[in-house]
Amino acid sequence: MKTRILTLAAAAALLFTAHSAVAASKSTTFNVSSSVSANCTISATDLNFGAYDPVVANKTTALDVNTTVTVLCTKGSTGVTVGLDLGIHAAAGNRFMSNGTDSLQYALYSDSAGGTLWSNAGAGLVTWPAFGPIGAGAGTPHTVFGRIPAGQDVSVGSYTDTVTATVNF
């Protein structure tokens, strides 16, 4: 019986010690942080002028069409501009579509066909407000107005060019 009482006393002591360890606690704090960097994406839809008719329809009338460039930037980005280069067939500061050795001149504008030329530098860059609020959902499109001037004497065929659109942020 004495052994049993000692065993019960030892068990009670262990329980008291375990209970005392659980009853005490300590805490600390830690910092949580992250950073968000300015970032933008840009996409564009192909610009297809369709048929250019230098003999009748476009003898005296330019051919005007448009497409869109879409930009999405991190909210709070500032100083965002979008530029369009002169294309891979540019010559003397002008844009040209090429068909072998023949060239068909065209221009790209930021505000209307025949308005402000859209380029990759200086006043030809489009600044962010033209694209609406930064961080707006799937991005904000801006119209690119294209024009083939009237009366160009070109050969039959398919004319192409490739323009690079760049977002600067």
Image (cartoon, rainbow, N blue to C red):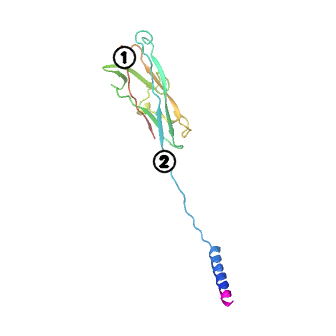
Residue ID for mark 1: 157
Amino acid marked by disc 2: Ser
Quadrant for the N terminus, please. bottom right
Q: Secondary structure at mark 2?
A: loop
| Residue at screen point 65% across, 81% down | 11
- Of residues 110 and 146, the one nearer the viewer is 146
- Of residues 14 and 74, the one nearer the viewer is 14
Residue 77: x %, y % from top left: 51, 43
Location of residue 29 with respect to 6 vertically, above or below: above
Quarter occupied by residue 84:
top left
> Which residue is at the far front?
1
First to last magenta residue range: 1-6
Taking the image as drawn, is residue 25 in sight?
yes
Taking the image as drawn, is residue 80 in sight?
no
Report how far apart the C-alphas of labels 2 and 1 lie in the structure. Answer: 47 Å
Image depth: mark 2 or mark 1 in front = 1
Query: Which label sits on residue 37?
Result: 2
